[in-house]
Image (spheres, rainbow, N blue to C red):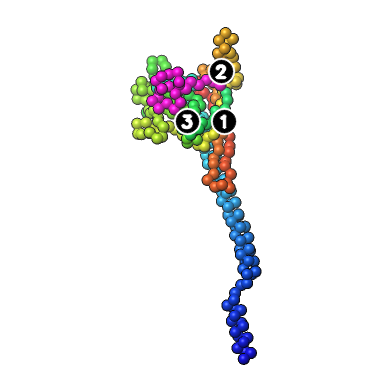
Amino acid sequence: MNYRTTKLDTLKRSVTGLTIIELVVVISISGFLITIVGAFALDYWGNTVSSSNHQASLVSRLNASDYLNSAIDQATGLINQNNIPDTNTGNADPLNSSGTYWLVLNAVPGLIHKGASGTITPVLYYNRASVDTSKHIIMNGAIPYEDNIMLYLDGSTNQLLARTLANTYAVGNRALTTCPAAIASSTCPADTVVAESVTSVSMRYFSRSGNNIDYTSIIDTNTGQFIGPNFPSVKIVEFTLNIAQSSFMHNAKAATNSTIIRVALRN
């Protein structure tokens, strides 16, 4: 009889399982361990994403440096406005009713911020000699034909882009006029992406001897208009690109960097 009772008690204890206190302890320990593992995993993934953001930012800065050094080095001069009409003008000159000429720029040092989504912000314009497929300069008598290049910030894509306006009078011109990506085609390819995730561009201009060029530095006392040195006097251009590579993870840091690119015009 005693044997059967002992055996029954043992069976009851095995069926009963954990007590409430024991269950609470198990859940607490499990939750603590899961929190530690989860925090470690999120921190690891966040650092990985942050590292990836910095790498993407570095690539963008290097690409921008390569493009601007090559492009500005080939420029025949900086200009205030395009002289080749553009049917897709990003920011048109309000004083020109045709709507095919970009907003007039002057050599005024300063910070140019990216605009809101849907806006285009001009940064710099310059001329480049038109060349044929054999890379020979196409001459117009004693002077070369020239294409226009328009650098601008796109508020929708956060990109620094370059629009090419090819000179149609230059027979055999290898350059093609480019268009916004949304309407690009084989005859009008997309504008060149110079840099990604650009928030602003700081501009400075210098003469060949290294003096600062600022159109607003001199004012006509009779008219009150600026008459300081302008783009024809600029021989060195300095860009400071401010780039912010955002992260898709809330705990990963965005990569915020700046890079200074100084380029001398060849002429």
Boundaries of the magenta span: 86-108
Residue 10, relative to residue 59: is it above or below?
below
Q: Is residue 26 left or right of residue 68?
A: right
Residue 192, percent from left and from top: 44, 33
Magenta stretch prevailing secondary structure: loop
Return the residue nearer the eye: 179 or 39. 39
Q: Residues within 10 Å of mark 3 (few under 14, many from 20)?
A: some
- Amino acid type, callout 2: Tyr
Q: Is residue 91 magenta?
A: yes
Res. 215 mark: 2
* Residue shown at 41% from the left, 22% from the top: 99
Mark 2 or 1, closer to the camera: 2
Q: Is residue 66 visible?
A: no
Give the total number of marks visible in the rendering: 3
Q: Alpha carbon of mark 3 to alpha carbon of mark 1: how far?
A: 21 Å
- Amino acid type, callout 1: Thr
- Amino acid type, callout 3: Thr
Residue 219, relative to residue 119: is it above or below?
above
Mark 2 or 3, closer to the camera: 3
Residue 61, percent from left and from top: 53, 36
Q: Are marks 2 and 1 in contact (CB under 8 Å)?
A: no
Q: Identify the residue under disc 3.
A: 119
* Residue shown at 62% from the left, 57% from the top: 36
Return the residue nearer the eye: 98 or 123. 98
Q: Identify the residue under disc 1.
A: 240
* Residue shown at 55% from the left, 31% from the top: 200
Q: Are marks 3 and 1 in contact (CB under 8 Å)?
A: no
Q: Alpha carbon of mark 2 to alpha carbon of mark 1: how far?
A: 19 Å
